[in-house]
Amino acid sequence: MKICIYGAGAIGGYLGVQLAQAGADVSLVARGAHLAAMRANGLKLLIGDEERVVHPRCTDNPAELGPQDFVIICLKAHSITGVIEAIQPLLGPHTRIVTAVNGIPYWYFYKHGNECEGSTLESIDPGGRQWRELGPERAIGCIVYPATEIEAPGVIRHVYGDRFPLGEASGEKSADVERLAALFVKAGLQAPILDRIRDEIWLKLWGNVCFNPISALTHATLDKICTDPSTRALSKAMMLETQSIAETFGVKFRVDVERRIEGARKVGAHKTSMLQDLERGRPMEIDPLVTVVQEMGRLTRIPTPTIDAVLALVTQRARIAGLY
Ligand SMILES: NC(=O)C1=CN([C@@H]2O[C@H](COP(=O)(O)OP(=O)(O)OC[C@H]3O[C@@H](n4cnc5c(N)ncnc54)[C@H](OP(=O)(O)O)[C@@H]3O)[C@@H](O)[C@H]2O)C=CC1
Ligand SMILES: CC(C)(CO)C(=O)C(=O)O
């Protein structure tokens, strides 16, 4: 099975090692010092007490790779529009695109089934280019639950988790999604196929919409945000606004807000990816995680005063740091 991981960073690198060890024909698209290190020494995954090293094809020129069975996009979500043209050589008539990113994906309103069917969202897909040029019909949804980091160029550290729920926009259990899930399982990952993938997208986003910007503003880790009464209340207020919006689009939350916050608290002294990005001077994933919820709130005419306030602050913080 030919798999290209587009953006073989923290999550893509973790997937790359696991899928290559499971026997897939894996190619990695990366750049800079990380690419150079992978070319020279292979890609190393530090997981528990173990070190796993693989030597897949690594490039910054996807045109070298040709059409794939699956292209797994593991870029930061705000980078996807910038690579639309570069992805094209990887796409054959049957290639599926797996969106292994946080936030709402470009295909969200494909086979959605109400008046929003076929709509695109400016905050994540400006001008609808991802929808038109990648194609919603190619997409398979994927939620990323593990946490991983690039410890050094060519070296990925696994922090926790191994679950990547997958699902078609239609909810169908297609042969493609079954094939992909079987490969993930062979690679030692959990990959349940969900018939309501959007519910799970929101369950993950429920945390990202509040914990990520609050952590970037306060530099607090997840346990502190969820324990301190004031940041816990702020998170809850943002989550309740988010829940009202999602439910208007037919989403069902399988846990309540308190349980979701408790789940995040138990993760412990973990820095969210947005805080890590701020500290390391990397562009912050604000639009795919926060602005998109505000945009969907505007579509549903649901007020989002708390999200608006936190979004204004984190955007200003990111601008001042030159990261937005
Ligand atoms: N890391 C984590 O623990 C988690 C991440 N996620 C989500 O997963 C997604 C991926 O995150 P993560 O893996 O952390 O991100 P990373 O930044 O670690 O990985 C993305 C990689 O893609 C590279 N890249 C960017 N643009 C290009 C390009 N044009 N050509 C080639 N390579 C490129 C980046 O290089 P460069 O550094 O040079 O930009 C980087 O190495 C995000 O949506 C994130 O929110 C979800 C849960 C946890
Ligand atoms: C911290 C966590 C797990 C949830 O907000 C995350 O997804 C991130 O850091 O982006």
Image (cartoon, rainbow, N blue to C red):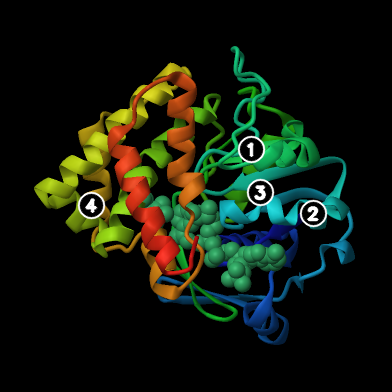
Cα–Cα gap, marks 4 and 1:
31 Å
Secondary structure beneath disc 4?
helix
Cα–Cα gap, marks 3 and 2:
22 Å
Mark 1 or 2, nearer chain start: 2
- Residue 166 lies in quadrant: top right
Residue 34, percent from left and from top: 62, 78
The three-letter amino acid code for the residue at tag 1 is Tyr
Cα–Cα gap, marks 4 and 3:
30 Å
Identify the residue position indicated by label 4 in the image: 266
User: Badge 2: few (under 14), some or many (20 or more) residues near its Cα, within 10 Å?
Assistant: many
Q: Are the residues at dot 4 and dot 3 in contact (C-beta closer than 8 Å)?
A: no
Foreground pick, 248 / 8: 248
Task: Report the side of 319 relative to 233 (left or right).
Answer: right
Mark 3 or 1, nearer chain start: 1
Cα–Cα gap, marks 1 and 2:
15 Å
Identify the residue position indicated by label 1 in the image: 106
The three-letter amino acid code for the residue at tag 3 is Leu
Q: Are the residues at dot 4 and dot 2 in contact (C-beta closer than 8 Å)?
A: no
Residue found 26% across the figure and 65% down from its top: 219
User: Badge 3: few (under 14), some or many (20 or more) residues near its Cα, within 10 Å?
Assistant: some
Residue found 65% across the figure and 26% down from its top: 173
Identify the residue position indicated by label 2 in the image: 87
Identify the residue position indicated by label 3 in the image: 183
